[in-house]
Image (cartoon, grey):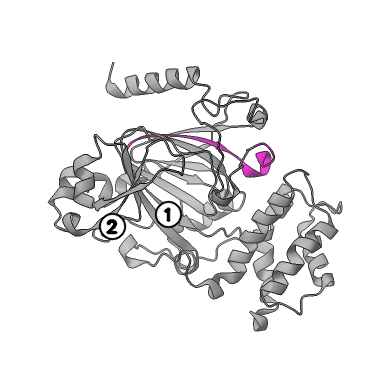
Amino acid sequence: MNNLVLIHLSVSVSLLYASYIGLQSGPQKSIDVLDGFIDPVQFFDEFVIPGKPVLFRGAAKTFPAFNKWTDEYFKSLPESDSFSAFAEEGKKENRGDGAKHLSFSDFLNVYQTEDIYYVNPVPPFLAPDVPIHHPLNCPFVIENLLADNVMWFSSGGTKSVWHNDAYENINCLMRGTKWFIMANRSETSQKAHIDMKDGAYSSVDVENVDVNKYPGFKDMQFYNVTMEAGDCLYIPWLWFHHVNSIGSNLAVNIWWRAYRTPLQCDHVTQLTFDQVHFKDGEDEEKQMPLNEAAHQNIYLHERMYTAKTIDPSGFLDSVGPALDERGLQHVTDEDVNKLFELLDSDRNGLLDYIEIDKILSVLPKFMLQFKDEL
């Protein structure tokens, strides 16, 4: 029996006996699996706009990083000695542990024996080894939506908190195995127990879920995804997830701003990380319509935490003041009501989670009507 099979068996047994997150309800669902990447327009049409995860099997095997990134290769680079970053302490994440400041080469010397893992943007001297993931290689995405990238590097055994992210995400695995337990935000917002609002995560112990304290997990539909080296996973914006890393583990992800509108992509670019600019926290004025749409989507979902719908009055109370704060004083209540009507697909006078998600594509266009005020 090979080591990989033993790893799978040991993890399966530990999950079974530890009341691990994802085992509290009925059978877990699987997601779509494709061989390799698809083009940006197809990716947005079939997966991003409907908010549907997909696993791109073997897609990262074409990356230079996939074959080059060994510990020996890293240590051979002189920049490893001078480049410094932070390694998070505690491979079972609780967001309360500290971080250790050390050089990249020092991390390589100790990560196999210490309870730490590397969570930083890809070092500049390694950025040429990582291409922009092909489904994102569209000029509009490159110029407007890219937010950040992260290199996740450990000896294995890392376990994330149950959380969601404020960005869309493609995670590509260079070595090791990852298990993702996920849940659709639109199906499960009221059950997810995201009680740490500032960090958008849950205080639940992912290895031993107390269903009396967190009863929502008993009724939640979970999705189970296994990534092997070379796979890339699309995690839709705000989907809840937990990640368990097995064996020496190295992954790179790209976060980009939520944009649920069909792409106009006249040509596909071929760029690497060193050739693009990730804009997390930058260009806020230029990105304001996109950012405001994402912000309003999150805010409206939070208002709906104890109810399944929102009516015109509640929508006006939420969106109207926010647009005023953005300098759109000429937006009237009638304008906001028209926006509500654009979202209300079934014309029942109420917005549900699915209709609220349409704000990602509708609100930027709505705001551009008042572009002279932006």
Residue tagged by mark 2?
123
From the viewer's perspective, is residue 8 above or below residue 88? Answer: above
Task: Answer whether residue 272 is visible to the viewer in this image.
Answer: no
Q: CA distance from mark 2 to mark 1?
A: 14 Å
- Front in this rendered view, residue 326 or 227: 326
First in sequence: mark 2 vs mark 1: 2
Task: Answer whether residue 55 is visible to the viewer in this image.
Answer: yes
**Secondary-structure class at tag 2:** loop
Magenta span covers which residues? 175-191
Residue 78 lies in quadrant: bottom left
Circle 1: residue type = Ile
Residue 89 lies in quadrant: top left
Q: Position of residue 300 (x, y in %)?
A: 71, 54
From the viewer's perspective, is residue 263 above or below residue 163? Answer: below
Q: Position of residue 237 (x, y in %)?
A: 56, 50
Q: Quadrant of the N terminus?
A: top left
Measuring 46% from the left and 69% from the top, which residue is drawn there?
143
> Does residue 248 appear left or right of residue 24 in this picture?
left
Residue depth check, mark 2 versus mark 1: number of the one nearer the observer: 2
Measuring 67% from the left and 36% from the top, which residue is drawn there?
191
Residue tagged by mark 1?
254
Circle 2: residue type = Pro
